[in-house]
Image (cartoon, rainbow, N blue to C red):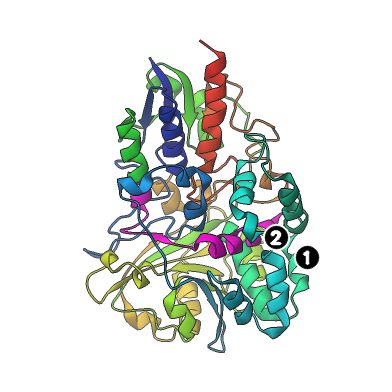
Amino acid sequence: MFDVVVVGAGPNGLTAAVELARRGFSVALFEARDTVGGGARTEELTLPGFRHDPCSAAHPLGVNSPAFRALPLARYGLNWLQPELPMAHPFPDGTAAVLSRSVSETAASLGPRDAGTYRRLVEPFLPRWDTLVRDFMSLPLSALPRDPVTLTRFGLVGLPPSTWLTRRFRDERARTLFAGLVAHVMAPLSGIATGAIGLVFALAAHARGWPVAQGGSQAVSDALAAYLRDLGGTIHTDYEVKRLDDLPPARAYVFDTSPTALARIAGLGRHYDGYRYGPGVFKIDYALDGPVPWTAPKARTAGTVQIGGDSAEIGAALRAASREGRAPDKPFMITVQPSVVDPTRAPAGKQVFWAYGHVPHGWTGDLTDAMERQLERFAPGFRDRVLARATAGPPELAARNANYVGGDIGSGAFSGLQVMMRPRLSLSPYHTPHPAVFICSSATPPGPGVHGMSGHNAAKAVWRRLRQTP
């Protein structure tokens, strides 16, 4: 009998397995796909020699993750590569606001009327960032706050809607940059705690950047898997779990799956019927014959480039996908260009390019033309650089990763009470009605992203339970 069986080898499942193996428990991990990785994989999706990340690509939360920073992942091949600029947001006039490692450079890019406001917004939190991010990403009660005063101050600023926070800015450049940061979680700009999301992404950039993993996001998963094996854990791929009886006996079972899949597998009935999934995305991976021809020079050196004309356009795109049930005419897009810092991802002189736009949950259309019109708007001649493209809408994304229900890469709507209390209203979100079954996916706090903290927090809950039972 194993102490713990983990189902799902995404970053959270791998992190949970590692944390428990480090504490001396015997751990076996089972994954339905032929490789580990979940939302952190790398594959040749277009042409030979072009290595793409089908899901996540840039990792501001990964490099700042307390869980990952406590593990010897560099020893197992994980090397973070920092582009010259973490992020740029180009405008139709050929200029760009930037999110730089430097607060001063970022503030200056927003214009003289908002530079001071931006500095006053972020500078109080930066000296306490490591403690703040640990407290923020360990909520709810998986750990007592180490700095409750700073966490409370952060909450007072971040819990209101982002539209309240951006009223501090006088010009559109700052409002647009911040709206784009919020849109990374596919939440309407008027939603609760959206101000906190924008602040977290900004502070993460100033603290440690928005890097890519050398060789691709698979390096994150492979490092976790290699460390797990060294700790004595076993990994079984190509092993689909449809019910608990498919698994070997264990004292505890930990699921890096969607809540609805867990309910089906573990026989939990309607326990998660109230869980809501959010809008989907339409993803395109490009093989390019050269760099993206951005009009804004700053965008050419940024690892991540946000695409949205202004805050109103971004807000309209989010409303269309999340509330109106239609694909936006001018989609807000997040793009990543790993090749600006990692030439190993493509043949010499070529580049890989990653982009997605928001669409309604389960949408079955094709957003390629609308996305490329947006790209041409800020990078004229982009289509001429395309050698090949691989597209994936919500059905294809869900088929590739079962946790992306309806194409929701956040594994759950980021709105209402579900922002803080997911997958249910509970002070112990990693527990289930079955005393030996736990959940550790992005459907649990702190939510989406390649950071492993949901797995880290769930492992604590499992460890406490196992200490109490023989």
Q: What's the CA distance linking mark 2 and mark 1?
A: 8 Å
Image quarter of the N terminus: top left
Relative horizontal placement of residue 98, taking residue 347 as reference (left or right): right
Mark number for residue 286?
Answer: none
Looking at marks 2 and 1 on the same chain, the residue that comes earlier in the sequence is marked by 1
- Three-letter code, disc 1: Trp
- Three-letter code, disc 2: Gly
Which residue is the site of mark 1? 164
Relative horizontal placement of residue 273, taking residue 347 as reference (left or right): right
Q: Helix or strand or loop: what does disc 1 sit on?
A: helix
Which residues, given as a range, are shown in magenta? 192-221
CB atoms of marks 2 and 1 within 8 Å: yes
Q: Where is residue 17 in the image (x, y as percent from the top left)?
A: 42, 32
Vertically, is 443 above or below 217? above
Residue at image position (27%, 59%) is: 44
Given residues 329 and 467, the one toward you in this image is: 467
Vertically, is 307 above or below 274? below
Residue 211 within the magenta-colored segment of the rendering: yes
Q: How crowded is mark 1: few (under 14 residues within 10 Å), some or many (20 or more)?
A: some
Vertically, is 229 above or below 113? above
Q: Where is residue 239 in the image (x, y as percent from the top left)?
A: 33, 32
Q: Furthest-front residue in view?
A: 127
Which residue is the site of mark 2? 195
Residue at image position (60%, 27%) is: 431
